[in-house]
Image (cartoon, helix red, strand yellow):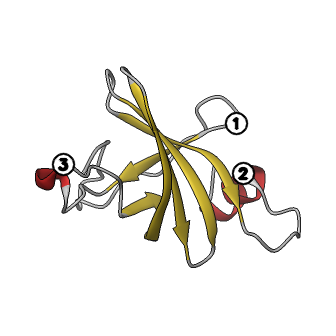
Amino acid sequence: MTGERNRGGAPAPHTVSDGRRLTVHVAPALDALAGDDAPRCFFIGARRVEAEDVVDRWLAADHRYYKLLASDGTYILRHDLPSGRWELTVYDSGRGDGRSLRACQTAGGAQ
């Protein structure tokens, strides 16, 4: 798994990196050996999010974006290749209730 871990092996709590993006911890993709490195599971704090589908992806030389559909909404994750850092850049619950990245920060326990 990319990112720091606590003593017990659990993902370390996420941090707010710049007020708009959250650092997330991504479980290695089982399909990575087959050339598909899209995340299938990631953690926001201690909360585990399972990706049901990879809706889209944008690939560049030094970073990747993945648009993921999960049971509670749509997430866009950014992977910075040089640092190995993953960030949550967009969250949409799809409910039209104004739940956004800021709401996701609160739900995930951002400090």
Residue 28 placement: quadrant = bottom left
| Disc 1 to disc 2, C-alpha distance | 7 Å
The residue beneath circle 2 is 101
Q: What residue type is labelled 2?
A: Leu
Q: Is the Cβ of the residue at disc 1 closer than 8 Å to that at disc 2?
A: yes
Mark 1, residue position? 20
Dot 1 falls on a residue whose secondary structure is: loop
Image spot of residue 87 (x, y percent): 51, 40
Q: Which of pointers 3 and 2 indicates the residue nearer the eye?
A: 3
Q: What element carries label 3?
A: loop
Label 1 or label 3, whichever comes before in sequence order: 1
Residue 111 position within the rendered picture, expressed as x and y whole percent measured from the top left? 64, 46
- Seen as rendered, the residue at the extreme left is 33
Up-down relation of residue 95 to residue 55 (above or below):
below
Residue ID at (76%, 50%): 102
Residue at 88% from the left image edge and 62% from the top image edge: 98
